[in-house]
Structure formats: structure tokens, C-alpha cells
Image (cartoon, rainbow, N blue to C red):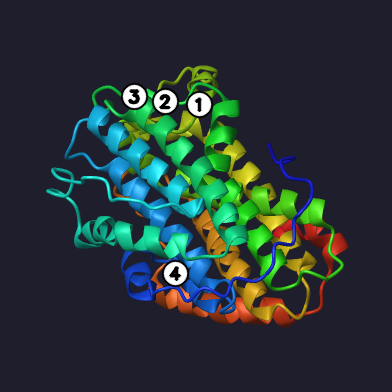
Amino acid sequence: MNQRGKRILVTGYSTSKLPDFNPLLKQVSRSFYLSIRVLPRQIRPQIGLTYILARATDTVADTTSAPAELRKEILLEMRAEIAAAAAGQATHSPDFLGLSEDMSAGDRSLLESFPGALDALRSCSASDRRCMGDVLLVITEGQEIDLSRFGGADSRQIAALDTDEQLDDYTYRVAGCVGEFWTKMCRAHLFPKAKVPDAVLLEKGVRFGKGLQLVNILRDLPRDLRQGRCYIPRASLAGLGLSPESLLDPVCMKKFRPLYDRHIRQADRYIADGRAYVDLLPRSQLRVRMACTLPMLIGVETLARLRTCNVLDHSCTIKVSRPEVRLLILASLVHCLRPRHTKAVHADSQSL
């Protein structure tokens, strides 16, 4: 999967004047907003807009206030409207009636902003629309798969992924494809003539994104289980004599720990690819490098805490606090200003 897209096409600059989605981004995104805010102005609006559209479709897929069949119908309509806008065609807003009853204010704002976000997408350059439309197609396909798999699940009847291959596909569709999209946009708008290894940069961008999503899966395991979702493959659990339902019992952590640690090590390797990704970016792109380094450092800190906690105990909340995030912002600047050691990045990952 990480072999997709061996060459980055330089697509030119967008001159569109996009609306300011920063207030909404700040409302619905805790950490990704910080990375977007750091980005250069040439790509900040397009990446922010893509996030808004992806979060809007995710809101529909995840809401519990409507049956899965209705959510899927609306999700497919949203995907069709996004595809039309990406093609520069006229669009109309889906009917969200009945979906927003139990939503947060931020989620309601996302749905209310959807028509304006479609208009903004349609106003982008053709090359940007194509790139944004491609990643949103992959994301919404992943949301459709997730909805089909987990739409009727709850804590009494937990649905789970079956294999490691399904887990890999899920992390690609949720975040690996975002690393791919991010790389293409940055390459096209910020350093089209720089001598960087495109294939390697794309591959590591995909793995970096998958790593950040795997960290989220490992951190959010107890919450997901109580919503009827298990992203730890059933086959791996069965090998330890466990089932998704058994993970509701914190006492099972000792038996579960070897498998959990294996996924932590995989996340470590992906995050090490994120560090290598940053080192491959041109030194002149300080903002982009900082925008990538911050989530990498948050991921490192989260994994360090997951190694020692009983993640099956839902009272054990793993969260990097806002003061800690502010310190990591400073650390990301220091990291980006230090000399590069690209060849040593994998060896150095042991210290992450």
C-alpha cells in the first residue's frame, strides 16, 4: 500500500481566495489545527479545507442519532457532492435533517459549513481540486467500510477487524493517504524544483500518517470497545486466547500486553519514518518541517505513556495536556533547527 504513487506531479500554484475556516478548525481539531496554523499560506487554506470536508463526512459516519443505513446514504451523497465540486461542477447540500440532535456544537457547525466548503473546493485551481478530491475519495471510502463494519455494533456485541491486512488498509485510508496528499501539495506549491527523492518522500509520508493513526487506535482502545469497535484484529487476539469482548476486562491486560506491545513497536517504526520524512524536506521549509514535527513529538510522548499504563482500564486516560503541547511546539522548533542526520534516523528511533 505504501508503494502507491511513485512520482509526485508538480501541479502549480493555486491563486484562489478561499474563505477563512480557521475558527471552525480550532473548534473541531485539537492538535491538527496547530499543524495547519504553522503551514505556509500557499497551502494552509487547501489543507484546512480538506480537513473540514473530511471531518464533516466523518461526523455523519460516526453519529449515533440515526440508523446506519441513513448515515451511509447521506455519506454517499456527500461523497458525490465532493466529487462534483472537485470536478468544478455545481453542487447542492445533502439533507442532514435528523442527524444533529445529539451532536456537539462543533459537529453541527461542520455540517452547517458543508455547502460553503463545497463552494470553496470548487473555487480552487484544477490541480488542487484533483489532489483534494483524490484524498477525500479514499477517506470517504474508508468511512463507508467502517460504517458497514461497525454501524450496528455496541458494547454488548463488539465488531472487530479480522486481520492485520485490514488494520493496515484502515490506517492508510484514515491517515496514510493524508500523508500522501500533504506531500503532493507541499511539493507542488512550496518546493517544486528542489532535489528530493519523490518516491521515498511519498512512502515515508504514507507510513508517517499510518503511524499517527495507529497511535490513536492504541490510545483510544477502551473508548472504542465501549462503542462496539475493536481495531485490534480478531485473529491476533484469538492467538492469545482472547476475544474483543474480553478486552473490556482490565484484568486481561497481562495476557494482552505482548500483542499490544507489538503494535506499539510498529507505531514506533512508523513514527521513525516520520522523523526521516522531516529530515528529507528542504531545510528552507521550516514551517512545513515544524508542522510535521509537532504531531510526531506528540505521538512519541503518547507511546511512552502507553507502554506503562493498563490501557484496558477506561479510567486511565492518556492525553498530552495543553501546557505539554506548548512545550512540544518549542521542542519542534529546536528539532527543526538542529543539524540533520538522515542516515542515522532508524538507529536513533530506538530513543524515541
The type of residue carrying mark 3 is Glu
Q: Mark 2 near mark 3, Cβ–Cβ under 8 Å?
A: no
- As drawn, the label of residue 33 is 4
Q: Mark 2 or mark 1: which comes first in sequence?
A: 2
Q: Give the SS element for disc 4.
A: helix
Q: Nearer the viewer, mark 2 or mark 3?
A: 2
Badge 1 is on which residue? 233
Rounded to the nearest angstrom, the CA distance separating label 2 from label 1 is 6 Å
Residue depicted at 65% across the width and 52% down the height:
180
The type of residue carrying mark 4 is Tyr
Quarter of the figure with residue 346: bottom right
Q: Tell me residue 83's x, y (percent).
A: 47, 46
Q: Mark 3 or mark 1: which comes first in sequence?
A: 1
User: Viewer-proximal residue, 173 or 117?
Assistant: 117
Rounded to the nearest angstrom, the CA distance separating label 4 from label 2 is 30 Å
Badge 2 is on which residue? 160
Q: Mark 4 or mark 2: which comes first in sequence?
A: 4
Badge 3 is on which residue? 245
Mark yes or no: residue 30 visible: yes
Q: Mark 2: give few (<14), some (14-19) or many (20+) Cα within 10 Å.
A: many
Quarter of the figure with residue 333: bottom right
The type of residue carrying mark 2 is Ala
Q: Nearer the viewer, mark 4 or mark 3?
A: 4
Q: Give the SS element for disc 3.
A: helix
Q: Mark 1: give few (<14), some (14-19) or many (20+) Cα within 10 Å.
A: some
Q: Is residue 221 left or right of residue 352?
A: left
Rounded to the nearest angstrom, the CA distance separating label 4 from label 3 is 35 Å
